[in-house]
Image: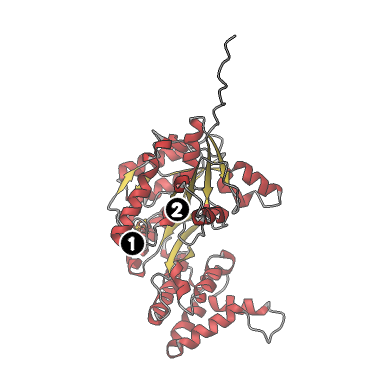
Amino acid sequence: MDVLPTMKPKRELLYGLVDADMISNETRHPNLALLKIAGYLRDHGISYRLITDNNADISPFDHIYLSKVFTFTPLPQFYVDYMKSSSVKRHDLFSCGGTGWYATEQDLEKFLRKRSKDFYQLEKDPRLKGLDMKRQMPDYDLYKSYMEEQIAKGRSRVYYKDYLDYSIGFLTRGCFRHCSFCVNKLENRVYPHSELSDFVDDRRPYIYLWDDNFFAAPLGFVRQKLNELIATKKPFQFRQGLDIRLIDKERAQLLGMARYHGDMIFAFDHWSDRDIIVKKLKIWKKYCPHKTTKFYLFCGFELTPTSDEKVFEDICQLFWRIKILMSYGCLGYVMRHEDYKKHPLGNIYTQIARWCNQPQFYKKMSFHEFIDRNQFYVPNPEHKCMALRTYEAFLNKYSERRDILEDLFDKVKYTSLVDPSLWE
Ligand code: SF4
């Protein structure tokens, strides 16, 4: 009788997917690139697993995709250990990507090189042959079991709603504004990206969009896409904010008709834009007077340990922007660039954000009153809380211009400034 040679059963490939921002608790948003890789692997019958432990055993994995969005996100310990290990031969175990690997690169040539590589590396990856990042339907279940574990441990479901309830995608990519702090700084235009059918999952009740500057697309495109969004009957939201400088009657009316989810978010990043923003606010408030409207307020950029003048000016401009927003009945949301930490008085930005970013404080009290309220809850009146210490140190630093600061900290108050006659 012939004896057949023993065939070793072929071992299935197993890929690991790592959301470094999630592992280090820096985010509450799923990573779209990983969702799409997972979607591709699912569609091609390849096994994969989300790695969620900082010290995970990575030996079972044939390849690992590691993504991080923020430059300040630390790398997982298993990655650091693996790269340090001298016995390791296969340094190609990891494919790393995401804006967190290059967003703060100062050298523009290097920045461009790294960004271009990052943009196209997955579609060029021989393991993901045929992957089309625009068209690939995400695997929204990638995070499911991890989220269920966390909820079972007592975390609220609402905390994880972005992972559980939303379809996520980009209708457009790019921008033309060249803001120096933005990863789009070298982009010159907005171009179409995915179709809604590429990423909307009927089982998910909401849609959120990561478009950088949707309103900068041609009006016909904007009209078509807003109508498509409205036709889904699902509430939707542009998470990065919309560019109010580009709003007109039709864009405002379309948004007014839509089931927009949550607050309408715009950006007021530069004090130099105040005239156009006021002009556009009048249009927006005319067509959507009742929609809660919030503006991202970028600040703290390019500070150094000695940039005292810049800090003074930046804080004044922040309050002047808030003053305009309050008069139009809008909320502010302070977005601090990491550079704010470099200045010894950088904590003033944290205190202002604590006040401004919480509508229950922003709408009821001035910044000064908020600081006093912090101190009120300190059990021992001899002890000054961090908020008060920061506030006093800031005023003392600029003692010659104390009156300017006190005026802003006392008088920029929603209840005194809101003026419906500006838009009614
Ligand atoms: S407008 Fe927004 S997306 Fe465009 S470059 Fe400026 S920050 Fe970036």
Q: Alpha-carbon neighbours of circle 1 within 10 Å: few (<14), some, or many (≥20)?
A: some
Q: Between residues 236 and 43, which one lies in front from this camera angle?
A: 43
**In this view, 236 is above or below 391:** above
**In the rendered image, which quarter contains the N terminus?**
top right
Q: Which residue is mark 1?
A: 179
| Residue at 36% from the left image edge and 47% from the top image edge | 119
**In this view, 166 is above or below 178:** above
**In the rendered image, which quarter contains the C terminus?**
bottom left
- Residue sticking out furthest to the front: 1
Q: Which mark, residue 288?
A: 2
Question: What x and y, as percent, mark residue 211?
Answer: 40, 49
- Residue sticking out furthest to the top: 1
Question: What x and y, as percent, mark residue 13?
Answer: 52, 34
Q: Between residues 358 and 47, which one lies in front from this camera angle?
A: 47
Compare marks 2 and 1 and give the one earlier in the sequence.
Answer: 1
Q: Amino acid at mark 1?
A: Cys
Residue behind label 1 places its C-beta within 8 angstroms of ligand 1: yes
Q: Amino acid at mark 2?
A: Cys
196 relative position to 16: left or right:
left
Question: What x and y, as percent, mark residue 31?
Answer: 50, 48
Name the quadrant where ligand 1 sits: bottom left
Mark 1 secondary-structure assignment: loop
Question: What x and y, as percent, mark residue 182?
Answer: 37, 59
Residue at mark 2 to residue at mark 1: CA–CA distance: 28 Å
